[in-house]
Amino acid sequence: MNAHVSTDAPVRTTCPYCGTGCGVLGSGAQVTAGDPDHPTNAGRLCGKGSALGETLSLDTRLLHPMVEGRRADWDSALDLVARRFSEAVRQHGPDSVAFYVSGQLLTEDYYVANKLMKGFLGSGNIDTNSRLCMASSVAGHRRAFGEDVVPGCYEDLDEADLVVLTGSNAAWCHPILFRRVLDARTRRGTRVVTIDPRRTASAKDSDLHLAVRPGTDVLLFNGLLAHLERCGRVDRAYVAEHTTGFPDALSAAKVDAGDAELVAAACGLDATQLLAFYDMFAATERVVTVYSQGINQSSHGTDKVNAIINCHLATGRIGREGMGPFSVTGQPNAMGGREVGGLANQLAGHMDFSPESVERVGRFWQAPGIATRPGLKAVDLFERLASGGIKALWVMGTNPAASLPDGERVRRALKACDFLAVSDVVPDTDTARSAHVLLPAAAWGEKDGTVTNSERRISRQRAFMPLPAEARPDWWIVSQVARRMGFGVKFPYAKPAEIFREHAALTAFENEGRRVLDLGGLASLSDADYDRLAPVQWPVPAGGKPQARLFGDGRFPTPDGRARFVAVTQEAPANTPDAARPLVLNTGRLRDQWHTMTRTGEVARLMAHQPEPVLEIAPADATVRGLADNSLAEVTSAWGRAVARVRVSADQQAGQIFLPMHWTDSFTARGSAGRLANPACDALSGQPELKHTPAQVHAFPMRWEALVLSRRRYRPTGLGYWTRTTIAGGYAYRLAGGEPADEGTLLAREHLARGREAVEFLDRRRGIFRAMSFDGQGRLLGCLLVAPAGALPDASWLIEVFSADEPLAPESRRALLGARPAQSGPPEGRIVCSCFAVGVERIRRTIRDHQIVDAAALGSLLKCGTNCGSCLAELREIVARERQNAPA
């Protein structure tokens, strides 16, 4: 099961974070570097990738099967899963069971799970958390191209003269790709346009930022299509020979957006800026339009995708060097899951539920009971769970209680589920707490298989660590359950290479050029060839060569070989702001965090950049609501509430707020954005409206706040607000409440770790309490600072002392109790560059001491910003502020 454990030579594997698919070198229990030979990243890694070696600890791992909260053996746990699913199918029919899987799974894991559910349980009810990320792109591709195919490759970013980023903060979410774009700007003068309601790090590094009104993307790109026709930039010959539907699409665009001035007004843009973008696009042959979650996560996401594709088809800018629409995926194997039918509305091998495809896949699998219709998409699946229609659910490698919209309802549904099995690497997630059975899955570094990145490149994910304790690969777990359900002869797999060969063979089975996805050339790989498999882009047909770009010849996988224009019009988002909820809530990723932080949340330097859930709000909106920087605010929507720290930011437009998606009940009391999020979905793709939730914000009553430093990990109780942050040597807890100061001191005091020696300080008049706890050697075990709201001192220096984990002299202890810095060296401050752990205070000192004038000079001294570059925008802002504040 695990052939590639550590050897003396580094093992080439693939990063488990975003869909970029960077190569990584691992050895023993260490991540040594980025893979210099991988074509995606050529050795570069982002901050998260650089910290992968710090995520390999077993301290928080699920290492043994658990049944009803007690340790169990594998046989009894697997027997129970098989029995409960078999009983549900027998008593209530195949559609009473479901799998909810993840883009964290390897392709081989995905394939086996999909085969079991659709092929042998007879239901289409397997869907994936990729439904929340890329389903609208899938639907848009299928409407336009006839198949879910990304036509371009990363080299197009290197060769483009214009890169349009829309709904994509690539500087933070795909930093290695964004660095390639910036390198192209330096090398060939590539211009960059960012279309985003927020002034993101990507926008700050662009030549033009269009701060579009949320939800108006179809109108903006329909306006572009009408502009292209007006200025004679439509490639009439290409349109006539290789497409259908152009007159209808153009007519819809003209009705929708025939006048650029009106488009600009409706989109909330300056007309001069909008026309500058339109003219730039029209005049530039080599244009790549990169789009991601800001486009997809919408009740009209599929129309947005097709509005973008329409502009590229109209100009013939697709499938050739430096041009094309480019969907970048959020997860490492979202693409692989789509290949094997991980979405409820698809079969494996990019086949659908047409009778012909059902019959073909059924014959290949020898599965006479194969599902004949699509299953429930993610949001619908959990609605069925809530209503009692799903009797047995298996969640693999994801945390829907935190990530799905209308999260409170999802939590209730999971708790009420007749039988819930969860396969995961950690036992303490919002979803796992409701599980009847927990199954310990292999984690990154231990897994062996393949993933497919955003440019259709298949890379090997190889194990460089042994499987710990009783953890097992997901494909093995699913296969074992299949055998216990009586399907053993169809699930004989002993190694992932066998599964990959079957998957590859299915893509080529009776294909005859009808489907672009064809891995026939890899279907006969030996085990040794599979082990050595170098990164390769599909299609790889038998006897053919891999292709980096597709559709350059104007041929598409549709019945007539032509691409389809799709007539789309601007429609209002589902659920719009009103007097009760006048703000638009947007959610998204942070630079240094991943999904629900089960991995990145355990790394101190990744948590240091933003240690709490932060609500970003425009100055005008903050003033009206009486909110100050660093105060707490309560956000409410029709579906729930959350509490977060306030950041007043000019990067937010008035009327809009932003809350990161990552925080869960494991890290904070009430910081989950999923509890607020709009569950309305795109009618075609089933992707929810995660970027547009009507909301209101109020000041959260806070009379006291506290900081607790502790060597132990726990979940605070009885508090109005708390968050947990991993720091070197332990954890930092930030607490707050609306109780009187004395009561708040008592609540906070309960969380102080007790040692052999303790010292305390109380000033009841000022509402200040401080306490320190030490072991027998004078090491700081725990620390508590309590103060009135807004009066808690900056304690970054205290965290540094705590993290040093050294005995403290009596005078140092007195200084700590007085909230005075006790260390001799200068403070690091909040981490800005996570790649090299460079803090804001060191950056400021260096700017002043060396009279730094730009980020490049700063990087030459401190290395910050010289790796992935995702902190460059912030570094430039710090340099500008320090220069502005410097004495004349």
Image (spheres, grey):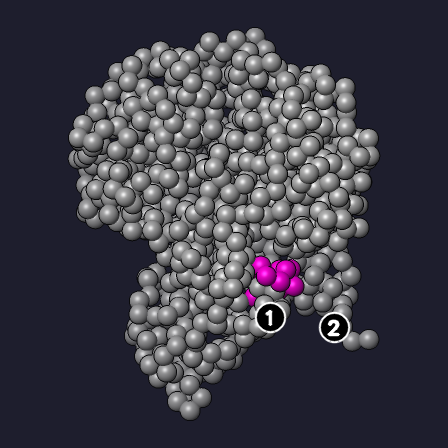
Identify the mark at residue 151; answer none if there is no mark: none
* Residue 545 locus on image (x, y percent): 60, 14
Q: Which residues are magenta?
A: 647-658
Circles 1 and 2, Cβ within 8 Å, touching? The answer is no
Whole-percent x, y for residue 475 in the image: 34, 28
Looking at this rendering, what residue extends furthest in the bottom direction? 765
| Closer to the camera in the image, 228 or 447 | 228
- Residue at (59% x, 73% y) in the render: 623
- Residue at 73 percent across and 25 percent down: it is 316
Q: Earlier in the sequence, mark 1 or mark 2?
A: 1
- Local crowd at mark 1 within 10 Å, few (<14), some, or many (≥20)? few
Q: Which mark is residue 826?
A: 1
- On the picture, is 692 further left or further right than 243? left
- Residue 288 placement: quadrant: top right
Q: Residue 613 placed where, x, y %?
A: 48, 60
* Residue type, numbered disc 2: Asn
Question: Between 160 and 442, which is closer to the camera in this rendering?
Answer: 160
Amino acid at the residue labelled 1: Pro
Figure check: 429 above or below 774 = above
Count the marks: how many?
2
Q: CA distance from mark 1 to mark 2?
A: 21 Å
Residue at the spot 39% in from the left edge and 89% down from the top edge:
764
